[in-house]
């Protein structure tokens, strides 16, 4: 499973709030938010299943988020998120609990962020 720090070939970016496409060169790759309205950017990974993603840091996630496995190209629900002092444990349904740094960017299904 590969759910973090992974970009896909041919991604395109949209701001729902501003209702406009954001060029790859204009994307803030630290916040993954729109520079105009500060809302999260919706990412189209050109997947055949038409999955839209959002890149979130562990502290921006909640237990209702679904993570996107770049290897199998499928979404997984979560069992829980535990925020520790230096790292965070994310329980992934039908998989296992994985440990991430707070600087890791997790590919999650777009959920009206
Ligand atoms: Zn915007």
Image (cartoon, grey):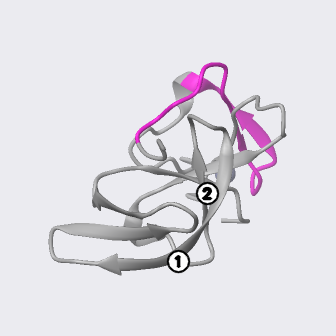
- Vertical placement of residue 71 versus 17, above or below: above
Direction from residue 32 to residue 81 in the image, left or right: left
| Residue 53 placement (x, y as % from top left) | 66, 48
Cβ at disc 2 under 8 Å from ligand 1: yes
Q: Residue at x 58, y 27 (%)?
A: 8
Q: Is residue 94 magenta?
A: no
Q: Is residue 23 magenta?
A: yes
**Numbered label attached to residue 79:** 1
Query: Mark 2 sits on what residue?
Result: 37
| Residue 22 placement (x, y as % from top left) | 67, 34
Please name the predominant secondary structure of the magenta segment in the image.
loop
| Residue 10 placement (x, y as % from top left) | 67, 20
- Vertical placement of residue 3 versus 48, above or below: below
| Residue 85 placement (x, y as % from top left) | 16, 76
Q: Residue at x 77, y 53 (%)?
A: 16
Residues drawn in magenta:
5-24
State the image quarter where residue 30 is shown. top left
Q: Under tag 2, what secondary structure? A: loop
How packed mark 2 is, by other alpha carbons closer than 10 Å (few <14, some 14-19, many 20 or more), is: few
**Numbered label attached to residue 61:** none
Give the camera-side residue of 74 and 50: 74
Give the camera-side residue of 71 and 58: 71
């Amino acid at each position: 499973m590969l759910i973090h720090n992974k970009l896909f070939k041919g991604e395109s970016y949209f701001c729902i709030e501003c209702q406009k496409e954001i060029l790859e060169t204009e994307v803030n790759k630290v916040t993954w938010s729109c520079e105009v309205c500060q809302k999260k950017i919706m990412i189209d990974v050109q997947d055949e299943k038409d999955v839209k993603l959002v890149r979130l840091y562990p502290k921006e996630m909640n237990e209702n988020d679904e993570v996107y496995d770049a290897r199998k190209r499928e979404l997984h629900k979560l069992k829980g998120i535990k925020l520790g002092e230096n790292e965070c444990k994310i329980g992934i349904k039908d998989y296992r609990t994985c440990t991430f740094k707070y600087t890791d960017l997790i590919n999650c299904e777009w959920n009206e962020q």
